[in-house]
Amino acid sequence: MKYVKRITPEAEQLIIQDLTKTLESMAALAVKHNLSLYKIYKINKAFNIRTGKSKSYHIPGLSGENHPRHKLTLEQVIKIRKLWSKGRSQNKIAKLYKVNQSTINRIVRGVNWRV
């Protein structure tokens, strides 16, 4: 999947209009239900996560090498797990593959790259 790096001024105006409408509707909901705008925002965010509309959480089909920001291949992940099982430290593995140690930690724990 390729992302657009630059948007046209017309597209930017449409996005701003949509965001303005969203903020206005959220403000109206806050007044109607006597809630803070922040509380409405949190409810909206939770709803988007449950319905899969949020882009900041897992999207089915976009994992592993299919994810546009992947840094490792499946072969590398398998090698990482073998190195770790043989006693190599996570820091050394991270330096070898030029990724953060927390990335290696999530891989060996099975949080990321569930193979």
Image: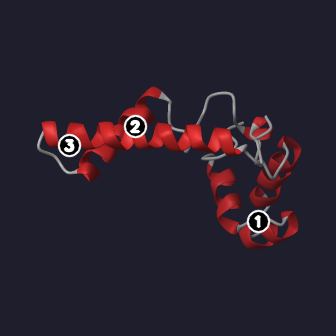
Identify which residue, 107 or 60, lies in the foreground.
Answer: 60
* Label located before the other in sequence (1 or 2): 2
CB contact under 8 Å: marks 3 and 2: no
Instruction: Give amino acid for label 2.
Output: Lys
Residue drawn 25% across and 50% down? 37
The relative height of residue 14 versus residue 85 in the rendered view (above or below) is above
For the residue pair 66 and 115, the one nearer the viewer reads as 66
Mark closer to the chain start, 3 or 2: 2
| Image quadrant containing the C terminus | top right
- Identify the residue under disc 2: 21
Q: CA distance from mark 1 to mark 2?
A: 55 Å
Name the front one of labels 3 and 2.
Answer: 2
The quarter of the picture where the N terminus appears is top right
Q: Is residue 47 left or right of residue 98?
A: left
Residue at 85% across / 63% down in the picture?
Answer: 97
Whole-percent x, y for residue 4 in the image: 76, 42
Q: Secondary structure at mark 3?
A: helix
- Residue 11: name its quadrant: top right
Measured from the top left, where is residue 54 in percent x and y?
50, 37
Q: Viewer-proximal residue, 109 or 42? A: 42
Q: Can residue 57 be seen by looking at this rendering?
A: no
The residue identified by callout 1 is 87
Q: Nearer the viewer, mark 1 or mark 2?
A: 2
- Total numbered labels: 3
Residue 53 percent across, percent down from the top left: 50, 31
Disc 1 marks which amino acid?
Gly
Q: Earlier in the sequence, mark 1 or mark 3?
A: 3
